[in-house]
Image (cartoon, rainbow, N blue to C red):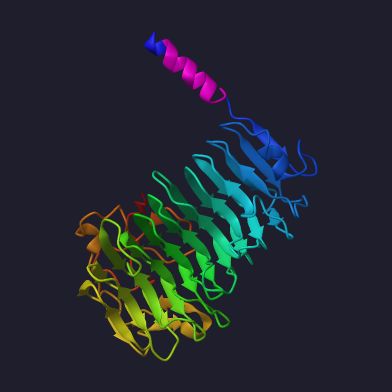
Amino acid sequence: MRIMCLLACALFAAPLWARVISVGPEGAFSRPSEAARVVRPGDVVEIDARGDYRGDVAVWRVDRITLRGVNGRPVLHAAGRSAQGKGIWVIRGRDVVVENIAFVGARVADKNGAGIRFERGSLTVRNCLFQDNENGILTAGGAGMRLRVEASEFIDNGAGDGYSHHLYAGRLERLEVIGSRFLRARIGHHIKSRAQYSLIAYNRIEDGREGRSSYLIDLSEGGEGWVVGNLLVQGMGAENRTLVAFALEGQKGVVSLFFLNNTVVNQRRWGTYLRLGKGSLAWVINNIFAGRGRLTQGGEVVMRHNLSHPVPPGFQDPRAGDYRLRPDSRAVDQGEPWYDTLPGNPGLCCQPPGPEDAPGAVARPRHGPPDVGAWESETALPSPRLRLP
């Protein structure tokens, strides 16, 4: 009897096969919002890039769906409209995947308009663009909520008030941002997270010449943070002297930061690279700190194998934004293999930051000590590739 009940529940919970729902000029529906009203668990919604979706907004409430752009990357331009006064898409389903879609121009009355407002369950965003929104992605918080962002771009987001950001994660269980690019946040932060666990790995996070961001990364309430293999560049017009902040707005549970193999560049005259809340603990290993300023402030810090100097330590072409190491750089072979020794390492190593680099695979030489910073010298031998969690 129990087996029969379980089978019946499984049959009613989801269809026996995944439907493909086409949206676009030749599709079953002309706009994504129409598909949102009929989608069922397990469905794949394919949105044709050749369609015109200006002003089309939607709420997705269904679990286990994939929303995918095809024939190029479709552009969802808010054009003054929003779903429930929140953004272009509001997502409330569990195990939702969004792939290859551009979200542009979200604005609402409270200046918190988001390309995606994520409110429930778990969401994976892959190969998407968020541009000229008040927030690129804005999340609620809650038990079991997870957000993973892969190979995506965030450009020119923010309302300009300092309270809206490229990506703002509330009190999630887990945030992962991997192999993505963040450029020119408008006064707010590039990444702000209150998640219990935050993984920020292999990204390019930079202000650019016109950028006026506040923090590059802000893990506001601590938790467990892994910031690994990123290029972090604070521009001359940045609004805040601190580049990375950790646990400055209270603390929830574990308060540990692992800041590893990053290349951090401060283009201002002075700044603080890492500012830590009282009682927090940070492992700061194998990083390059290029520019003038104080390395850390507050907290308890374990510092090993870092390089810091106003003069860049052998970058290829920093004026052109190329922070790879020259073969004669003093960062070559000066690091330690923390990925073999640090407690709790979730399978991380290091690779050059993306988004041009595919997420999910990382490489470091095993023939000798690793290089310091986000890149390994091109003279190094390739190593076995490890998988991210």
Which stretch appears magenta?
A: 4-16
- Foreground pick, 338 / 343: 343
Q: Quadrant of residue 143?
A: top left
Residue 330 in view of the camera? no
| Above or below for 377 versus 108 | below
Residue 312 in view of the camera? yes
The x and y percentages for residue 197 are 34, 55
| Above or below for 121 versus 306 | above
- Foreground pick, 57 / 268: 57
Q: Which residue lies furthest to the top in this view?
A: 1
- Foreground pick, 339 / 187: 187
The x and y percentages for residue 76 are 69, 55
For the stretch drawn in magenta, what is the main secondary structure?
helix
Task: Judge from the rendering whether residue 143 lies leftward or rightward of residue 101; answer left or right.
Answer: left
Residue depicted at x 66% and y 61%: 104
The x and y percentages for residue 292 are 36, 89
Task: Judge from the rendering whether residue 358 lies leftward or rightward of residue 56; answer left or right.
Answer: left
Q: Does the magenta stretch include residue 374?
A: no
In which quadrant will I find the N terminus?
top left
Residue depicted at x 59% and y 29%: 18
Residue depicted at x 56% and y 55%: 127
Q: Quadrant of residue 158?
A: bottom right
Q: Which residue lies furthest to the right in this view?
A: 25
